[in-house]
Each structure stands twice: as structure tokens, then as C-alpha cells.
Image (spheres, grey):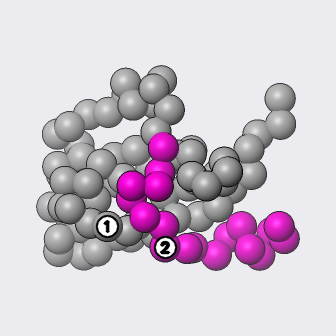
Amino acid sequence: MSDSHLMKSHTVKVADVYVPTARRKTLDPAKAEEIAESMIEEGQKTPIQVRKDGDRFVLVEGLHRLEACRLLDEESIEALFVQAKRR
């Protein structure tokens, strides 16, 4: 993937985004609801960040935006593809 491909936002299905357990524990439901209300009025302003893992996408950044989309019963979300960090 070229860098230009990584920085272009794509639409992905909310159901295809996997949230790692450790990240899920950081969820603040009140914050997700606040973002959902903002999305109703203004739409999604900042894409989430995901990395490709087989047929699914693993959430890297944007847990509350993703959860806000779930609260709104959105089927898709704007996402930037990032590469997994090398360890």
C-alpha cells in the first residue's frame, strides 16, 4: 500500500470492525452518546483508524466514534487504513 492509499478515507461496515478487548475497556458510554448527538447534527468529522486483518478491520483509533455509529444504527463508518505498528 502506498502512503496516499493510507491517508484516503474509506467507508467500512461497522459490523466488520473488531474492537480489541483491552481497547473496549476504555469505553465511556456518556462520551459515545455525546459524539452520537454531534454526528446527528454535523455528521462524522474525523474518520476512525483501522488496520486490515484478513476479512475484518481492527480498530486502532476512534472507539467512541465507532460506538456512536452503533448507537445511531449506522451500517457504515468512514475509516483511514493504517499499518500495524512493527514491534
Tell me the tag on residue 49. none
Relative image position of residue 70 (x, y in whole percent): 26, 54
Mark 2: give few (<14), some (14-19) or many (20+) Cα within 10 Å: few
Quarter of the picture containing the N terminus is: bottom right
| Mark 2 to mark 1 CA distance (whole Å) | 10 Å
Numbered range of the magenta stretch: 1-18
Relative image position of residue 50 (x, y in whole percent): 58, 53
Relative image position of residue 4 (x, y in whole percent): 77, 75
Give the mark nearer the N terminus: 2 vs 1. 2
Judge whether 4 appears above or below 57 on screen: below
Q: Tell me the residue that label 2 is attached to.
A: 11
Seen from the viewer's position, the closer of residues 27 and 73 is: 73
- Asked if the stretch drawn in magenta spans residue 9, the answer is yes
Give the residue type at disc 1.
Answer: Glu
Judge whether 36 appears above or below 8 on screen: above
Q: In the image, what residue occupies the spot 57% across and 52% down? A: 56
Q: In the image, what residue occupies the spot 20% across and 62% down? A: 73
Does any portion of residue 9 appear in the rendered image? yes
Q: Tell me the residue that label 1 is attached to.
A: 75
Quarter of the picture containing the C terminus is: top right
Dividing the picture into quadrants, the one containing residue 14 is bottom left
Does any portion of residue 46 appear in the rendered image? no
